[in-house]
Image (cartoon, coloured by chain):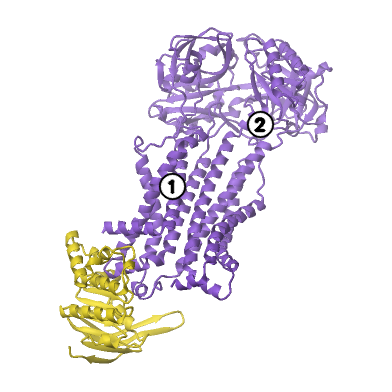
Amino acid sequence: MLKNYLMVAFRNLLKHKLYSAINIAGLAVGLATCVLILLFVRNETTHDRFFTDADRLYQVVIRAQLPGRQADNVAATMLPLAAALKESFPEIEKTARVVQSPTVFKRGDDSFSETVRLVDPDFFRMFDFPFLRGDRMTALDEPNGIVLTESMAKKYFKDSDPLGQTLEVDGAEPAKVTGVISDMPSDTHFDLEIIRPYAAGAAALRGLETNWGGICCETYLLLKPGADAAAINARLPAWIKTAAPTLNSPQGSINLGEIFTPRIRNVKDIHTDPVQSSMRPSTSYAEILTFAAVAVLVLAIASINFMNLATARATQRAREVSVRKVVGASRGQIIMQFIGESLMLTLIGLLLSIALVELALPAYSAFLDKELTFNLFTDPLLGPALLGLALVVGVAGGAYPAFFLSSFNPARVLKGASSGVGGGSGRLRMTLVVVQFAISIALMVATAVVYGQLLYAQNKNLGFDKENTVILSGFPRGADRERQQTLANSLAKLDGVASAAGTDVTPGDGNEINTNVRMPGADPNQLLVLRQATVDWDYVKTLGLQLVAGRDFDRSRPADQLIFPPQPAPGAAPPADNAERPVHSGSVILNEAAVKRLGFTSNEDALGKEFEAGGGASTLKLTIIGVIADFHFRSVHDPIAPAMFYVDNGSFSDMLVRIKGGDTQKTLAAVERVWRDMYPTRPMQREFLDTRIENLYVREAKTSQMFATFSGLAILIACLGLFGLASFTAERRTKEIGLRKVLGASVLDIVRLLVWQFSKPVLVANLIAWPAAWYFMDRWLNGFSFRIDLNPLLFVAAGGLALLIAWATVGLHAARVAQAKPVTALRYE
Amino acid sequence: MLKLVDLVKAYRTEEVETTALNSVNIHVRDGEFVAIMGPSGCGKSSLLNIIGMLDTPSSGQYWFNGEDVSTYGERKLADIRKKNIGFIFQSFNLIDELTVFENVELALLYHDIPARERKERVKAALAKVNIGHRESHLPQQLSGGQQQRVAIARAVVAKPKMLLADEPTGNLDSANGDEVMRMLTDLNAEGTTIVMVTHSMPHAQYATRIINLFDGQVVAENLRAA
């Protein structure tokens, strides 16, 4: 019996080549798309599972609620937190902090700036990264030790064995290689290349070691077996209020425990819980779910093709079904036969889709920058998962046709050609086409909105001029301000340079420093916190910021600059809370958000007003001399923080250089020469501001490209189905078309007839797609602080495009049928 | 073999009810060859569909081998049909995708008969209707008469007790029609009960009894001497 079923199915497949090709191609593309998406989803949801103790490894996240600001979540903490947690929570077995530390290494005459991660000694005892050389348990025991990834080891030591060799470090003791680990795999949140013991950089961090306000390191915990993370999380908010100190200053008291609330999260959840982090960018469950939904929709479209084409062809199979019934087949047997056929087609589609996935995987992996694996032989879950997928699609797609086909009344079918086949399925077919096109139109709208928002973010007027601006960094730690000033002046004199200005704050970086301020006469209990930025005289000009009231800083007015006494030596005790603080006066420029935050009625109202701000060991008395329009410090996803800008006599971390158009390469070479003259031992690091801003959206750009590709495939599969359906309809209506032509219809009349028949479902599809797409995309856009509005024209355009695609698909076919001689059509029956 | 008592078949649409069969009483004994005649629309096919258990009556009784099957469900009817009844149609109704051999074999596939026995029986059935030499051809490669012979082979291969033929010669020329009728007569002679609907008086003459239907009622029964 099975042989007979297979034979009939196979011969049908060969006989109706177009139908088979459409079905198999649709299923193959649909399944391949689905598999590719699911590989991505699997990778995204299985990060950091390879650590032996992954279940017990946690990271601390801080929720920072600064007064007047939206709460911010950061995967970073203050340095003293780890030890305090370990002391208070007996459930914690080990802790390890990770601090970023820019370091310059030398090899011969070459210098290299690298990002070193300083980690506590237990780090590798908690995270069992595979060690290619050296001993994981002791690699960080020596204070001058250094652990490199394979790539870094190759970079510095070529092919020689790096273990035990030394690396010269600028301004410090040489480091001795104590271990080599594999490069970070794609399924971890860690972004490590060079790891050193905390002790190697402890001196520079001394001031932060007791500072509960400085968020500067990742903190990881290993909980004891059986420890309850939820219980720890429940206790943390109350605990931090007692553990963190209250800072008293003339500008008011701040209990840091009120501002910073820690929580812990399992390492396996880090990648899908997006918060700001210095490690690799994370994703969100919403995004993963969106892609999973696209996978399901694509498969649904392919299954609908199958259902539609199978029921459309019902008349051709009606006689076979009836004969089988007459010779004794039960309905159940016929249902099983057709579901079996559907499974056979799906399995052929699956085989093709495996080939498609293999073909697409290298480019896809490269695009996503992930190591996605697809190996049926080494992955025990993959084979069963694929078969399961085929089974679901085969049964889902085959069930309706099977029930429909098996319901024929054999007496009527066998008497006359096809009178036993009900006409109701035509309506259902059109309903399914409506569903397909509704999905396609909604995906088109979604793609357009995602792209629109991305373009908006990339091109939004950020409030500064991102073109032709270079950010220089790589200054030695505690650089000399005078030398930096000389550098800025020398750079500004270069032919190709318009201006140069040092700063601690360049747009796009994650650093921020906040301080509490007090308005004269204001309620001392009202906490006002502003973001503070120390900048250079020409900061406003160099960044192209827009001054909306008052004036810019002016070198000729000494009162514009805050002059601080030299910094106390590292390790010196901070002044007591009640100590008399020296007062320093100077000028300040606010952004508009700060003007509002401080309660001024207008920008002009703020000019000339004074306020006090905390300035470490001193109090700042600041006079507002100007207001600049709000600009984005980070991506447009983040709201703009109220901020103040002042010029002081401290050193800068970065130098902004605005270059003139023209020979950029020549100018950059000149800039580098000036830098080398000033800092011969420090390699200059250079980044274009517009590149940095673009990089903020890399992930979104990839997401939108992926979304667009998969939507395109969904539409392609839907069109395949429509083409098949149109061809069957034309075939079924051959006699009608012939008669119409005999009665005087032109080719155009016939084409119009068929095209209109298929336009109706597409038009109806809009009615479903538009509100659904509007609802979901509006919700999606609400996740951005700055978003585009949904444009109704976009929806109309998507609907119109779908209609055009449908016309093109059906029209070609209709034209061919309509041009046939009517006599051929009439002979058909 | 079968007995119809006060059998009624009515078709309802939203507006009208059409009575196809009205109080029909027919008794067919084992081994009979009955021809049913009558003008188009008189209910011949409706009657044959009910006898063949492809349709169920609206009221009345249908006794088949001593069982009243008029209230049986589709599954049970399919089972009785499979074991007892073979069909021959005017339009042959062969499956285009299957060869002659496979078309005939289809009737045995639902009977759990081992492959070897199936092969033997199919070959014997094809030989009986003189079409054995075309067993690997597809239906469209055969003439109408040849196709109907294949259909007869398919109808008899499962050795049904009763053969229902719905205008078996309607699509054939007279030579081929006569040939088919001779085959049916031979089968009847071997003991198979045959009920045949036909328009053709000459072909009806092959039967042992002719029942005339008009407007859904039996109007005459002529017993013929064999």
Q: Specify whether A489 is left or right of A364.
A: right
Q: Can you tell which of label 1 and label 2 is closer to the viewer? A: 1
Label 2 lies in what chain?
A: A
Q: Quadrant of residue A676?
A: top right
Q: Quadrant of the N terminus of chain A?
A: bottom left
Q: Position of residue A185 (x, y in %)?
A: 46, 27
Q: What's the colour of chain A in the image?
A: purple
Is A231 rendered above or below residue B135?
A: above
Kind of residue at badge 1: Leu
Separation of marks 1 and 2 at Cα, in angstroms: 51 Å
Depth order, front residue of A785/A170: A170
Is residue A291 at least partly visible in the picture?
Answer: yes
Q: Quadrant of residue A105?
A: top right
Report which residue position mark 1 lands on: A31
Q: Earlier in the sequence, mark 1 or mark 2?
A: 1
Depth order, front residue of A322/A234: A322
Q: Quadrant of the C terminus of chain A?
A: bottom left
Q: What's the colour of chain B in the image?
A: yellow
Report which residue position mark 2 lands on: A67
Is A786 rendered above or below residue A535?
A: below
